[in-house]
Image: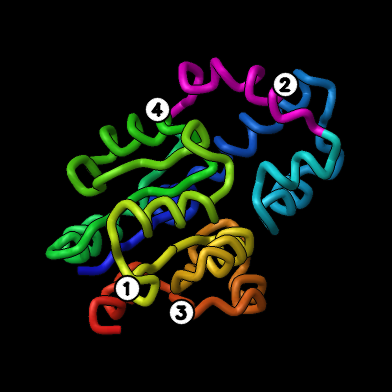
Amino acid sequence: MKLFLFDFDGVLVDSLDVYEKTVTDCLIKINRPLTRGREEFLELFDDNFYESLEKKGVDLDVFMKAAEDIPAKIDYGKMKPFTAMRPVLDELKKNNILIVISSNDSPTIQEALRLYNFNGIFQEILGADFKFSKKEKNLYAIKKYSTAPRDIYYIGDTTGDIKEGKQAGVKTVGVTWGWHSKEKMAASKPDHLFDSPQELLNLIHD
């Protein structure tokens, strides 16, 4: 049995516009606005998203308070699932465990999975309401599912994902259809770097 840990935004769904707007709106609401647009937003994911906010002087308690009503305001119609992922997930799920690990909140993820017909795929969702640190979420999964790190893969689309996966000691998989460029992902030196969802099936025999 292998454990496949999936980032949500940028890996399972194309949600960059929606996520950027919600974060931008929250930061404006607490008087900590971004000043360089998308470039600055994506830089928040060079490392752990919440640590990056703190480095900018954002009080996380204040930020999370401002974000409380976000799930009710999400326009799911502006998010699109990567449809090529579904058959891949169905195949990976055979004899393995799939989990979502994300900086997004669990209610938003759960609703999106329901709407985009990803129901029944994932054993668990570990969002921002569980822990801020993706490293800690990875370590939690290792302990809970008693799986050796060599059989655990964290699949992400930002350099921050790769860094936190490495910190947890699991195998890291970078994908190039998400938020950070292929060049940037390659520079983070994941154990695997894939250009299409179908390539994820190679991990079954890794």
| Contact flag, marks 3 and 1 (Cβ < 8 Å) | no
Calculate the distance from the C-alpha at mark 2 to the C-alpha at mark 3.
37 Å
* Residue drawn at 74 percent across, 53 percent down: 43
Query: Is tag 1's residue or tag 4's residue first in the polypeptide sequence?
Result: 4
Q: Residue at x 78, y 48 (%)?
A: 40
Numbered label attached to residue 77: none
Q: Which residue is mark 2?
A: 62
Q: Position of residue 117 (x, y in %)?
A: 22, 41
Image marks 3 and 4: residues in contact by CB distance under 8 Å? no
Residue at mark 4 to residue at mark 2: CA–CA distance: 20 Å
Give me the disc on residue 151.
Answer: 1
In the rendered image, which residue does mark 3 sit on?
A: 192
Residues at discs 1 and 2 in contact (Cβ within 8 Å): no
Question: Where are the magenta residues, as a range?
Answer: 58-76
Q: Identify whether 15 is placed above or below 184.
A: above
Of callouts 3 and 1, the N-terminal one: 1
Q: Viewed as shown, does residue 151 lie left or right of 154?
A: left
